[in-house]
Image (tube, rainbow, N blue to C red):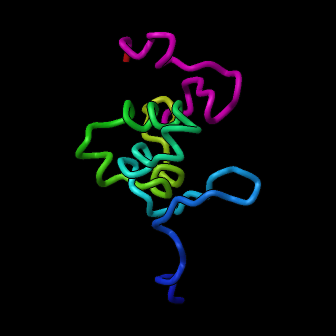
């Protein structure tokens, strides 16, 4: 299957005023995109705060969405994890990560 013609590297406005973000759009490009900075400033700020410039230049929207969680509590089923079981708790937020 040839996907080279798909707009995977583009950010475009949708008919209803939202944004369509391609899977291969780099986080650095998305954070600096005029539509994002103007209409979705929290998204831009989150992208800028989420990693170093070097990582933002390599990371993509699709990669972020599909990445398996690397948190040690997510991997350790003996510990609570809001991502695995919503409402069960998060040791990383509560500070008990220092006890491991």
Q: Nearer the viewer, residue 67 or 49?
A: 49
Residue 71's place in the image compared with 12, above or below, is above
Q: Residue furthest bottom?
A: 1
Residue 65's place in the image compared with 50, above or below, is below
Picture residue at 32% right of the left edge, 46% below the top: 56
Magenta stretch: includes residue 45? no
Magenta stretch: includes residue 92? yes
Picture residue at 40% right of the left edge, 49% below the top: 27
In the image, taking residue 24 as reference, residue 35 lies left or right, namely right
- Residue 95: give x, y in percent of width and height: 44, 10
Q: Quadrant of the C terminus?
A: top left
**Magenta span: helix, strand or loop, mainly?**
loop
In the image, taking residue 30 as reference, residue 57 lies left or right, namely left
Q: Nearer the viewer, residue 59 or 5?
A: 5
- Residue 62: give x, y in percent of width and height: 50, 58
Q: Residue furthest left?
A: 54
Q: Nearer the viewer, residue 1 or 69?
A: 1
Dividing the picture into quadrants, the one containing residue 13 is bottom right
Q: Residue furthest right?
A: 16
Dividing the picture into quadrants, the one containing residue 84 is top right
Residue range of the region highlighted in magenta in the rendering? 75-99
Picture residue at 52% right of the left edge, 59% below the top: 11
Q: Nearer the viewer, residue 84 or 6?
A: 6
Picture residue at 35% right of the left edge, 47% below the top: 28
In the image, taking residue 81 as reference, residue 50 lies left or right, namely left
């Amino acid at each position: 299957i040839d996907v080279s013609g798909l707009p995977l590297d583009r950010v475009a406005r949708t008919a209803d005023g939202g944004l369509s973000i391609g899977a291969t759009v780099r986080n650095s490009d998305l954070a600096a995109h005029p539509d994002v900075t103007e209409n979705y400033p929290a998204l831009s700020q989150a992208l800028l705060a989420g990693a170093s410039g070097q990582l933002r230049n390599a990371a993509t929207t699709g990669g972020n969405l599909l990445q398996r969680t690397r948190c040690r509590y997510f991997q350790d089923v003996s510990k609570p994890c809001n991502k695995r079981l919503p409402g069960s708790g998060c040791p990383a937020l509560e500070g008990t990560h220092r006890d491991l």
